[in-house]
Amino acid sequence: MESSLLTLTLFNPVSDELITGGIKGVKFWKFKETENTDYSGAAHMSNYKLFPSAEFPHMRQIWCTNMDLDVNMQRLYCFSNCDLFCFDTKGNILFQPTNAHQSTILSCIYSSYSSALLTSSRDSEIKSWNDQGSLLHVFHGHTRSVTHILLHPNTLSLFFSGSLDGTVKLWSLDTMQLFYSLSLFTEGIVWMGLTEDKLLYCSFARNLHVYDLNYFTKFWTRVSSQIKALSLCGANGKSNRVVAMGSDNSLRIFSLNNGIKLCTVLPPPYLSQFSVSSQLCL
């Protein structure tokens, strides 16, 4: 292993492999027992060594600047400055959006709720991609590099972002809009993550803060208009449903058991008095 050329390491607990990335791309390693006949300098597990088990040909000549492993889906996301490569753990490339961002990609996370990959970069943008590598949406709101993004541990329709502008923002994957913003550090947020107790920690070079997420007992969804009526409705052979009427005359129907949105009826198009009069004249 050429350690001087390695800058990144990950461990895959499913395949029991070490994944390394750096100047010479991405490689996989297995920890195996060797035949050691020299016992003069015996040490604990001295007869075990790392052996290369796979190498991604697509990344062989490309400098891997960052990478992340989705353990549940067994996907490896590799960044090479502005380019993004998505592999399965067998080395097959799934999609490859080139120039995904205008600047270096810093973080990514996959949302099973929206079936989309979220990426952030130094260009202050957060982008959403489908499984074919097509751009779905761009989240605007940060003014400096977005260093980390992570999913809400209890509400899959929400995700966090931390930035060098010193703010942590909470975004909705239902409306693709900002849900909440909190200014924490004037120096900017360098690292962000979740503890085992589902507390949010944020830090910069000298301080680390831990926050209680103060989440709802059950969060259903975010709507862009005020809810002016909420009722419980039932029908023959159907379970009870929650019906929400918005101030914009939109209608949403939810399951009472788990809060899943079953139906959305958007408001009818607005017709001005002039357009109505014109249609009547015709």
Image (spheres, grey):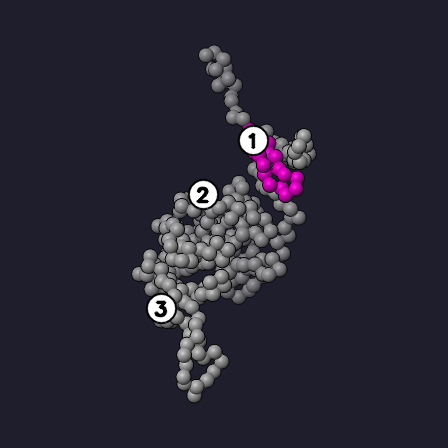
Residue in the picture at 50% in, 54% down: 149
Q: Is residue 258 visible?
A: yes
Residue 77's place in the image compared with 218, above or below, is below
Q: Residues within 10 Å of mark 3 (few under 14, many from 20)?
A: some
Picture mark count: 3
Pick the quarter of the image with the N terminus. Answer: bottom left
Q: From the viewer's side, name the closer residue of 216 and 189.
A: 216
Pick the quarter of the image with the C terminus. Answer: top left
Q: From the viewer's side, name the closer residue of 241 and 178.
A: 241
- Magenta stretch: give its range: 250-267
Q: Residues within 10 Å of mark 1 (few under 14, many from 20)?
A: few
**How far apart are the two marked residues, 1 and 2, measured between alpha carbons?**
22 Å
Residue in the picture at 60% in, 57% down: 198
Q: Amino acid at mark 1?
A: Val
Q: Percent from the top left, x then y, of residue 180?
A: 57, 47
**How far apart are the two marked residues, 1 and 3, measured between alpha carbons?**
56 Å
Q: Earlier in the sequence, mark 1 or mark 3?
A: 3
* Residue position for label 1: 265
Q: Percent from the top left, x then y, of residue 225?
A: 58, 35
Q: Amino acid at mark 3?
A: Leu
Q: Is residue 103 visible?
A: no
Q: Secondary structure at mark 1?
A: strand
